[in-house]
Amino acid sequence: MSISEKIKTLHTELPTHVTLVAVSKTKPVADLQEAYDAGQRIFGENKIQEMTEKWEVLPKDISWHMIGHVQRNKVKYMAEFVDLIHGVDNFKLLREINKQAKKHDRIIKCLLQIKIAEEDSKFGMSAEDAATLLASDECKELENIAIVGLMGMATFTDDETQVKKEFKHLKNTFDSLQPKHTSLEIISMGMSGDYELAIATGSNMVRIGSSIFGSRNYTSAI
Ligand SMILES: *Cc1c(COP(=O)(O)O)cnc(C)c1O
């Protein structure tokens, strides 16, 4: 199937309450344009420089999502245009995003990344840390960010029971925080290999890359 057919199929098959983020990292601009022409408007990238280069040349009604780990000193390069940052896992980063958003007179939406995987390598904060952060006065003072949900990445494994348990943990964390923090609306979980399970467990935003664009070759430039 072509990129365009994949996008159209996903748009038809995903439940209407689920938002599709097309993960286009490492893929050339022509591939993103094909997805755009098929109706896709949300793209996810994990490197700020690559995302910026693509933003410069592609249509301006694209919503750009930063899905990778963010270094604080690089926030300034995407503050002008990034729509949603998925991987926020500490207060210092949030403060920097707020500062850079303010310079552009914008509000940047953020998701708190919760560590749900058992593997050590994944970034993220605990459910308790997220609750503390959301309740803090310092957080409420940040006027140029909006925390609109949670994001998580499950362990990379074939063990569905394990993955489901981790997704459930994110959903439960969301359900425990949401009544007090009603701006939380998004649960970003699920990738090419596990998005159906993620949706069944409560995800309303999936980040799909290789199922749309094919497998990634990390040596190719954009
Ligand atoms: C690369 C990436 C994805 C997409 O992965 P696929 O398996 O290609 O769908 C989703 N989320 C994050 C955070 C990623 O880095």
Image (cartoon, grey):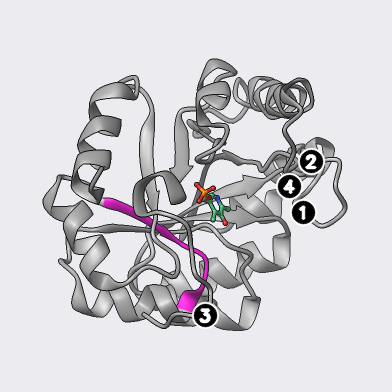
Q: Secondary structure at mark 1?
A: loop
**Residue indicated by mark 4:** 133
Q: Position of residue 189 (x, y in %)?
A: 57, 36
Q: Disc 4 vs disc 2: which is toward the camera?
A: 2
**Residue indicated by mark 2:** 117
Range shown magenta:
42-48
**Reading the chain from its start, which is encountered first: label 3 or label 1?**
1
> For the residues marked 2 and 3, what is the alpha-carbon distance in whole angstroms?
28 Å
Task: Tell me the tag on residue 122.
Answer: 1
> For the residues marked 3 and 4, what is the alpha-carbon distance in whole angstroms?
38 Å
Q: Position of residue 130 (x, y in %)?
A: 74, 42
> For the residues marked 1 and 2, what is the alpha-carbon distance in whole angstroms?
7 Å
**Reading the chain from its start, which is encountered first: label 1 or label 2?**
2
Q: Secondary structure at mark 4?
A: helix
Single out the residue that lies furthest toward the top: 200
Q: Secondary structure at mark 2?
A: loop
Q: Position of residue 217 (x, y in %)?
A: 49, 70
- Horizontal side, residue 58 vs residue 99: left or right: left
**Reading the chain from its start, which is encountered first: label 4 or label 2?**
2
Give the quadrant of residue 71.
bottom right
Measuring 20% from the left and 40% from the top, which residue is drawn there?
Answer: 5
Q: Disc 3 vs disc 1: which is toward the camera?
A: 3
Q: Disc 2 vs disc 3: which is toward the camera?
A: 3
**Pointer 3 local density, CA inside 10 Å: few below 14, some 14–19, many at least 20:** few
Residue 200 in the magenta stretch? The answer is no
Three-letter amino acid code of the residue under disc 4: Leu
Task: Tell me the tag on residue 68.
Answer: none
Pointers 1 and 2 in contact (C-beta within 8 Å): yes
**Residue indicated by mark 3:** 219
**187 and 162: which is toward the camera:** 162
**222 and 170: which is toward the camera:** 222
Q: Secondary structure at mark 3?
A: loop
